[in-house]
Image (cartoon, coloured by chain):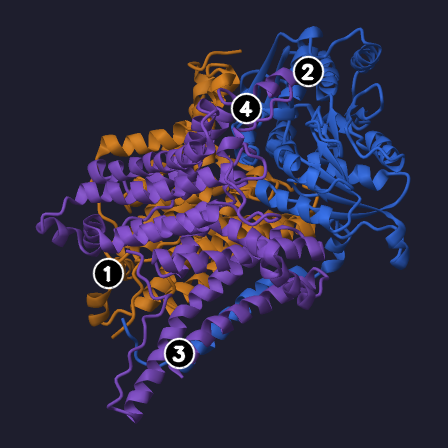
Chain colours: A blue, B purple, C orange
Amino acid sequence: MRNKNRSRRFKLLRFVAAVMALGLLASACGDDSDDGGATGTTAPATTAAGDSAATLLKIALVAPSASDDLAFTQSMVDAINELSDPVALSITDGTFVIEEAATAIREYAAAGNEIVVAHGTQFGASLAEIAPDFPEVTFLWGTSTDTQGLANVFAYSPDAAEGGYVNGVVAAAISSSGSIGVVGPIEAGDAVTYITGFNNGALANGATEVSITYTGSFGDVALAAEAATALITNGADVLTGSAQMVVGAVGVASDEGVPWFGTQANQTSLDPSLVVASQVYHWEVVLEEMIAQRKAGVLGGEAFEINLANGGLEIEFNDGFDLPADARAAGDAAIAGIIDGSIDPNG
Amino acid sequence: MHRLVSAAIPMLAALAAFACAAIVLVALGANPLEGFQAMYTGAFGNVDRLSATAVRAVPLVLVGAGISISFRASVINIGGEGQIIAGALLSTVTALALPGLPPIVLIPLVLFAGLVGGGIWGAVPGVLKAYASVNEILSTIMLNIVAVQFMNYMLRSPLIDPLEIERGTRIPQTERLSDNAALPTLISGTRFNLGVPVAVAAAVGAYIILWRTPLGFRLRAVGHSPDAARAAGIPVERSVVSALALSGSLAGLAGAILVFGSEGQRMITDGSSAGFTGSAGFNGIVAALFGGLHPLWTIPSAYLFGGLITGANHLQRVLQVPAALAVSLNGIVVIFVVSSSKVRDRIGAILKARREFDHPANESTSSPPAGEVAAT
Amino acid sequence: MSDFFTATVLFSTLAAGIRLSTPFLFAGLGEMVGQKSGVLNLGVEGVMLLSAFFAYWTALSTGSLWLAVLVGTLVGLLMGVVYGLITVVFHAEQGISGIGIFLFGLGFSDLMFQEKVGTPKFTSKLPSVDIPLLSDIPHVGVAFFQHSAMTYAAFVMVPLVMILLRRTTFGTNVRAAGENPESADSLGVSVARIRFSAIVIGNTLAGVAGTALVLELGIFQPNLTAGRGFIAIALVYFGAWRAPGVMAGALLYGVVEATVITWKALGIIPRSLSDISAMAPAVITIAALVILARRVKPPAALTQPFSRH
C-alpha cells in the first residue's frame, strides 16, 4: 500500500496537531499546580534546608501503592514524617511490580541511604538477596515477623488481629441484626490476620453471623461495592473490610447508612458520619527503636511488632459517629483485655 | 538520503514524545534535562544498568518472538500475561517436586516446564479457535483472568510456603525454590543471568521455526490465506493450534525465567498479573510489532523497550516524581513511534520518487522498513 | 443469612449484574462500531481510565454530575480524535497503538490522581432514577427499574447503535469500510473519514463507560477499571459484531460476576474457593460461546490500514 504524495504537507500538519493534542493533554498537569502541589508526597520530605540535609539520616522507602492511599503505604510515610528527628526521605511508591521494587531497593542501598525501607511483604524474597550485598545499610522490611536470619534487616509487623478484635467487639455491640459483613481482597497476608481477629471479636460479643467475602482482587473497586451490597441485602447491618479496594464497599455502606470499621489508616474522612472506628498503624513507635539500635551499632537482626500494648496500634474512634456508651465501653474493655493478656484475639 | 530520512523520522517522533514528557516533567516541577539524563543513565549508563535492562528485556523478547509466530499465522495472541503465569506455575511445581536434581538437569527441566506450561495455556485458545470458532482475542483475554485467579489460588493454598502458615503471616508465596534451579549469573556483580542468552536463543529458534521448517511454512501460509492453505492441503486447524501453542510456550519460558532469574528465587503474587509479569504480556506485543514481527528484530526492539522501562523507573527515583509517570511515558513513546512509521514510509516514497525522477536508471534497493507490518 | 433462592436475593443479584454490565455495554458497543469500520482498538481500558479520572475530578471540584458526565464524554471524544489520527491518518499498526493508548491512560490517570487528588475521597454519585410505576413492581422494580440514568442509557444505546449501523447511510459506509474498503473507496466513500468517525464514536462510548463506572462508585483509584476495558473488547467477539449480542455478553458476564459475589456473601461458595469461583465469569463466557458454536467472521478488513492507491 504505497501512497501518493499528494497531501503530504497536510498530513505533516496533522502530525504536528497530534503532537499538540497530546501535549495539551499532558499540560493539563500544569494548569493549577497550586492545589495539587501541596500533596507532593513523593518530593523528598526534607524538613531541613540545603546543606544541612547531608547530616540528616538518609532513609529511602519503597512501597507498593501510592503514598497517600489512606492505607498501607500512607501509614509508613506518615510514620517517617512523625519521627522525632527529621530525616532525608526518598520515596519510590506505586511499585507493585516486585522485580522493579527490587531494583529500587538495590539502587537506594547503593546510593548511600543509611536505611532502606522495603514496605511490602512481597519484597522480602528480593531483600534476602540484596541485604547481604550492602552490609553497611540497614534494611527495614515489613510486614514480616522474622528477619530471614539477615544481620542487617529489621522486620516489622502489626498484630492486626488485635485491632480487628476490638473493631469486631464494637461492631457486634452496635449491630441489631447480629449479622456483620466483611469485604476482603484475596485470602492472604494481613487481610487474613485482621479479618480473623474481627471475626473472633464479633462472635465473642454476641454477633450471630460474620459473613466474610473475598472478592479475589486488591484493585476491583466495583466488585468490592457489589460485595458490600450483597452483604447488606443479606442482612448485614455493620461492615468492615481490608485492602485498598474497600473504598467501593465504604461507598455502599455510606449510601445505605451502614456503619463502617476501618483498618490500616484512619478512614473517617471517607464518611465522617458512618465510620465508627479505625485501627491505625503507628510505625514510628518501632521505627524509633530500630533507628536507636542502628545508632548503637546494631544494624538489624530483630523483628518488631506494633500492637495495642506498645501504642503502635491504636483504635481511633470517630467522634462524628454517635457511638452508644456501652459499645464504647466494650471496645475499651477489649483493648484493656488484649493489653493485659486476658484476651487472645486469635482465639 | 532515503535511509537518512528513514532513520530520522522515528527519531523525530521520539523527540516529539520526549517533548511531551518534558512538558509533564516541568509540570511536576522537575528538570526535564536531568530527567532524560537520568533515564539514559538508568537504562544504559554502565554495565550494571545494561545488564538490568537486558534482564528486563528477556520476557519482552520471548513474548515478542511468540507474538511474531502467532501474528504471522494470523492469530492475535493477547494472552501473554496468562501464558507467562502458566509457565511460571508449572516450572515452580517442577522445582518443588524435584529440588534435589543437579543444576545441569534441573535448570533445563524447569525451563522446559515453563515452555510446556505456557504451551498448554496457549494451546487452549488455539483449540477453541480451531475447533469451536471461539475468537482468540476473546479467549486469550478471558484466560488471562483465569490464570491470575489460578495463580492466586495456587500460591495462597496448595503451593504456599508452610512457614507462612506456621507464622500466620499467610503471604501468598512459595518456599524458597531449590538453588539448583537458580539461573546462574553470567557477569558477576550484575543481574545478567542465563535467562538472557536463553531468550536470545529462543528468539533465534523462533526465527528458524518460522523460516526454515515445514511447520513455519505452514504457519505463514495459513497466515497469508487460510483458504489457499487449505486448498494446498495444509491442516489449517492444527496450524492454528500450533501457532498459539508455540507462542504461549515462549511466554511460558519467560515465566520460568522470571521465577528462577528473580532476586527472590520463589514465586509470589500481589494478587494481580502485572505484579508478577510487569505487563510483559502486553509490552511484548509492542516489542514484536516494533521489530516488524520478525523474531530476530524483536531482540533489539525489546532491548530498547526494556531500556525505556528501566530508564523511566530510574528517572522516577532520581527526580522523585510519581511512578505512574514512567508508565504514561512509555505509552507516549509507543504512540509517537508507531505513528511515525507510516510517515517515514511516505516521506521515503516521496524521496525515492524524486530520486528516480532525477536518476531514472538508478534502481534503488531499499530494505523494507521495520515498522511496516500488517497484523493480520 | 437468607437463602439465595428468595426473590429478594435473586432480584438484587440481577440488579447488581445489570450495574456491573453497564460499563461493559458502553465500551463494548463503542469497540464494536470501531471494529465494524475495520479498526481494532486495544486501548479501551486506557480511555476508560482517563475519562473516569477526569469525570471524577470534575465532580470533585465542581460538584456537578452533569459537568462530570460531559467532561468524561469529551475526554473519550478527544482520545477518539487522537486514536483516529494515529490509526487512520498515520496508518499506524492498530494493536500496538492501542496498547500505547492503554499504557498512557493507565499511567496518566494515575499520575493526575496523585497530583490533583491524592487521598481518595467521595464525590456525589449518580442518583438512582426510579421509573414511575414500573419501579414499584415488587422485586422486578428493584432489578430493572431502579438504576442510574447511565445504566438506562447503556441499554438505550443498543437499539440506537443498531439503527446507526443498519438503517443509516453512515452505517452502510461503516460496514463497507470494514468489509471491503477498496470497493467502498471506488464507490466514492471516504474510507478514512468513515473510519475516523467510527473511531471517535467508539472512543467516546469508551469514555462514557469509564464515566459511568466512576460515577456509580463515587470514587476514583489508580487502575479503577481493573481490566474491564479488555473484557469489553472480548465481548465484541462474543456478540459477533451485533449490538444485541454484545448486550447479551455484557449481561452474562455481569450477572455471573454478581452471582459469584452474592454466593460468596451467602457462604454458598466456601472461602477456600474464592479465587477459583472468581474465574466463573470468564470461563462461562467461553463455555457459552462453545455451546452456541457460531461461525461468524470478523469484518474482513479489521486491523488493515487503508490508503488510496
Image depth: mark 2 or mark 1 in front: 2
Q: Is residue A301 visible?
A: yes
Q: Amino acid at mark 2?
A: Gly
Q: Is residue C134 visible?
A: no
- What is the spatial separation of the Cα atoms under label 4 and label 2, in whole angstroms? 16 Å
In the rendering, which numbered label is found on residue B82? none
- What is the spatial separation of the Cα atoms under label 1 and label 3, in whole angstroms? 37 Å
At horizontal 54% and vertical 70% (from top left) the residue drawn is B16
In the rendering, which numbered label is found on residue B3? 3
Up the image or down, C232 lies above or below B181; here it is below
Q: Marks 1 and 4: in contact by CB < 8 Å?
A: no
- Mark 1 — residue? C176
Q: Quadrant of residue C256?
A: top left
- Mark 4 — residue? A214
- What is the spatial separation of the Cα atoms under label 2 and label 1, in whole angstroms? 62 Å
- What is the spatial separation of the Cα atoms under label 2 and label 3, in whole angstroms? 68 Å
Q: Quadrant of residue A122?
A: top right
- Mark 2 — residue? A197
Q: Quadrant of residue B353?
A: bottom left
| Residue in front for this viewpoint, B344 or A253 | B344
At horizontal 50% and vertical 28% (from top left) the residue drawn is B152
Q: Residues within 10 Å of mark 3 (few under 14, many from 20)?
A: few
Q: Amino acid at mark 1?
A: Ala
Subunit bearing disc 2: A
Q: Amino acid at mark 4?
A: Tyr
The percent coordinates of residue A42 (x first, y second) are 73, 50
Image depth: mark 3 or mark 4 in front: 3
